[in-house]
Image (spheres, helix red, strand yellow):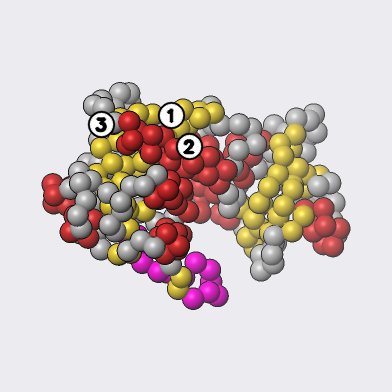
Amino acid sequence: MSFAGTPEDAVPALRALAMAGFEIPVVVTGTPRRRSRRGSDSPSPVAMAANELGLPISYDPDDLAERAADCAVVVAFGRLISAHLLARLPMLNLHFSLLPRWRGAAPVERALLAGDAFTGVSLMALEATLDTGPVYWRREAPIGPADTAASLRDRLAHEGAERLVASLTEGLGTPGLQQGEPTYARKLTAADREIDWSQPASRIDRQIRVGGAWTTLDGQRFIVRAGIPLATTQQMPPATLVGDSVATGDGLIRLGVVQPAGRPATDARAWLHGTRLPPGTRFTQAAST
């Protein structure tokens, strides 16, 4: 059974398959790349895990079918698999959503940003078109008020890996066609992450929990890494700094961890104590700076 995957989200499935005794003739992953501005090229998390497990690594998807494998498992590979390759080798795809809701590149982030009460993980037969294959199973997972995109992905990756091994061991059964109206999880852009302080605190909270939420202070990007929504009767214009909180369209967001431009992430209270901003300081949106 060949394997294709790239980010940390795919590592639990690879490890689970190896620990369960499945023979993995090749692991196909993304090429080494720079993962920080000042760093050098480094292997993907899946490549590092494959090295630890003593498994052969390739960067060419065609190698999935070149080795002695009866199928391949694909988890967050990051590239579409061509129709000619799928014609040579059947493939299973572990996808982090309740298909057909949130087909595409960023299903966890989109589910969280949209305010979905539930997300999940699905195992489908891979097709050349985007996440359209018949589904063997779906496992539902609630989205809690403190869940971040990172914590959700980690939970789904481990739950999906456990269920994947169990279903391969016990038998996959027959997949069924996806039921329901599809929605598409396009990759998030900087615009998706920019905070509009006139929005409800609940939406801004979800943006922060997705990761990388930002605003503008004194003409420079200011990232909000963590915060807590607060209900209040405070009547201040949105985007106004009120103590250690920021006014929104219907409440406050208490700042927890922030990252001013050119500086590391820090506790918001420590930043405020050192910066000593004047009363009435307001954040702005990029378009209005």
**In this view of the protein, which residue sits in the foreground, 121 or 57?**
57
Label drawn at residue 232: none
Residue 147 in percent (x, y) is at 60, 38
Query: Looking at the image, do the residues carrying marks 2 and 1 touch, with CB atoms under 8 Å apart?
Result: yes
Residue linked to disc 2: 159
Q: Which residue is mark 3?
A: 134
Q: Does the image show residue 234? A: yes
Question: How would you rate the neighbour count of disc 2 (Cα within 10 Å): few for under 14, some for 14-19, many for 20 or more?
Answer: some
Which segment is the magenta one? 28-40
Percent across and percent down for residue 114 are 50, 34
Instruction: Answer with mark 2 or mark 1, whichever residue precedes in sequence.
Output: 1
Does residue 263 appear to the left or right of 272 in the view shown?
left
Q: Quadrant of residue 92?
A: top left
Q: Is residue 39 magenta?
A: yes
User: Residue 101 vs residue 89: left or right?
Assistant: right
> Number of callouts in the render?
3
Look at 65% across and 42% down and name the residue there: 197
Sequence order check: which comes first, mark 3 or mark 1?
Answer: 3
In the rendered structure, the answer to whether residue 94 lies left or right of residue 156 reads left
